[in-house]
Structures are given as structure tokens and as C-alpha cells.
Image (cartoon, rainbow, N blue to C red):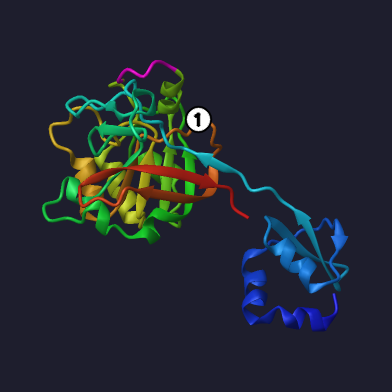
Amino acid sequence: MPSSDVAQLGGNASCQLARKLTVSLTASRKLNTTSELLDIMARPTTFSYHDGSHLVAEREVMRFYDVSVPISTELATYPGDPPVEIHQWMSLASGDSANLTRLNFGAHTGTHVDAPLHFIEHGKSVAEMDLETLIGEVQVIEIPDNAKIIDQKIVSQWCSPAWQRVLFKTRNSLFWNEDRSFRSDYTHLSPDGARKLVDNGVRLVGIDYLSIEKFQPSRFETHEILLSHGVVIIETLDLRAVPAGPFELICLPLKIAAEGAPARVVLRTLD
């Protein structure tokens, strides 16, 4: 590519190119014009230098995983939480001017986030949560099926202190292949495992069932440990199709001044 064309990209584009694009040893074709390069940059692509002189590109497809559990009247809810009710409030078939649905369910229905206010008096609500915590690189960690408790030993073995966001894929994921009745024997995070995550500097942790805590504890210590240190909790994830490894997390809960809220959670493969 002529040096004049590279110069036309400007400093920001050059920095973006240096920051975001990976090196590849395989070349598909040479790029000869600025417009051609800008067109390629708008698509998921890897860049490399070939023979030390020519910038080349090859297409790399990004993949998205929707790890949110659909909300329906058949969805299991944690015992004591409100059931899911979905009613047709207005309908075109009945002669109304539009279709309109009324929803009635708890803030912890389906895939959702727990804000500190859930167990911490005067803690932050979902509406006050930092988006920078909810969006960013995350590590999906696949825990062996024979592990029913994620304790300090497992966290030390499987979680790097460098990871700020972690999602635990456990035997719970297989539950989504079965009927949607509530299972009380789900794999959970123990209080000492929660303390280890806090010590590691984790800002967000997620799990693939309705609660991160063991069923009916005498005290919700795991929640208290995490939320008192500002760690966001995502519960009821569907990680069946997701392999272990790093992803970009996009978690967008409803902006409600409450202790929890349903969320659409998506994972994107990294460039």
C-alpha cells in the first residue's frame, strides 16, 4: 500500500489498527487503496504484514452466543419468588388497535443480575450499576461435572487472579435439556469460594442456574460476601453451547431502581 494512502487514514485509525487487529501468517490478497482498507476494517478481519512490506487481510467470522434463558410461564422460578404471568392485555384479533402484553414476575426471573441492594442495606440498585463492569472481557470456566460445590480450592485451581469477570459453566447447564421444574441439587459457589474471588479482584461472576448460593442456606453468606464488595452476580445463564475460554461479555439488565433485574446476556468471540 502506498505510504500516502496509509497517511490518509489518520492517527486514530492507525492506533485502532495497531490496538485491535491480530497478526496472521496467512495472506489472502494485497490491499492497494485506502477505501479498500476502510471497507475491510468495517468487517470482522485480521491483519498482518506479509514479506515485511504489504498489509494483507483475511476474513474472520465473529460468533455471538445468546446465553439468556427465555422467559415463559413454563420457566422455573426460585421457591418463594413470584411465578411468571404473561397476559394478553389487548389484541388485534379481539378488535383492539394493537397487541399489548402485560407481564407480571419478580425481578430475579430468568437470566438476571443481582445488585448490592439485594442483600446490602443502602447498596446500589441495578439502575446505579456501572456499565463498565457489565461489558468487557470475561472468562468462561467449565467446572467438572463431579464438582457440586465451587469452593476455594476449585477457584484457586481454575480461576486466574488476572480475570475480572468469570462465568461458571457447570453440570447445571445440562438441566436446561430437561424439564423446567426447579432443581435443588444445583452446583453452587461456597462462601470461601466467594472470598477467594473477592481476593482475586473479580468484579463480576455468573453461574448457570437460578442461584449462585446453595439451596435454602441458614444465611446467604455467598451473596453477602460478593455484593458487599461490589461484585455483580449474574444468575440463570444458559451456557450449554459455549466452550470454555475468553469472550466479550455484553450484559444489559433493565434499568430499574431495584435490587435485581432481568437481563439479556450475550457473549461474543474475541477478535
Residue sitting at 36 percent across and 33 percent down?
Answer: 99
Judging depth in this view, the residue of 226 and 91 nearest the camera is 91
Residue 171 location (% of width, % of height): 43, 26
Tell me the magenta residue range: 178-182
Foreground of the two, 113 or 10: 10
Identified by mark 1, the residue type is Arg
Horizontal side, residue 132 vs residue 257: left or right: right
Please give left or right for residue 33 compared with residue 253 in the image. Answer: right
Of the pair 103 and 82, the residue shown nearer to us: 103
Judge whether residue 164 can be spotted in this image: no
Residue 133 x, y percent position in the rendering: 37, 57
Image quadrant where one finds the C terminus? bottom right
Question: Does residue 231 sit above or below 263 in this rendering?
Answer: below
Q: Residue at x 32, y 17 (%)?
A: 181
The residue shown at (25%, 31%) is: 214
Label 1, residues with CA under 10 Å away: few <14, some 14-19, many ≥20: some
Where is residue 263? Give x, y as percent. 36, 43
Q: Residue at x 25, y 44 (%)?
A: 260
Main SS of residues in magenta:
loop
Tally of numbered tags: 1
| Residue 71 in view of the camera | yes
* SS label for mark 1: loop
Q: Quarter holding the N terminus?
A: bottom right
Q: Which residue is mark 1?
A: 240
Relative to 155, say whether 76 is above or below.
above
Q: Could you say which is closer to the camera, residue 85 or residue 122?
A: 85
Q: Is residue 50 magenta?
A: no
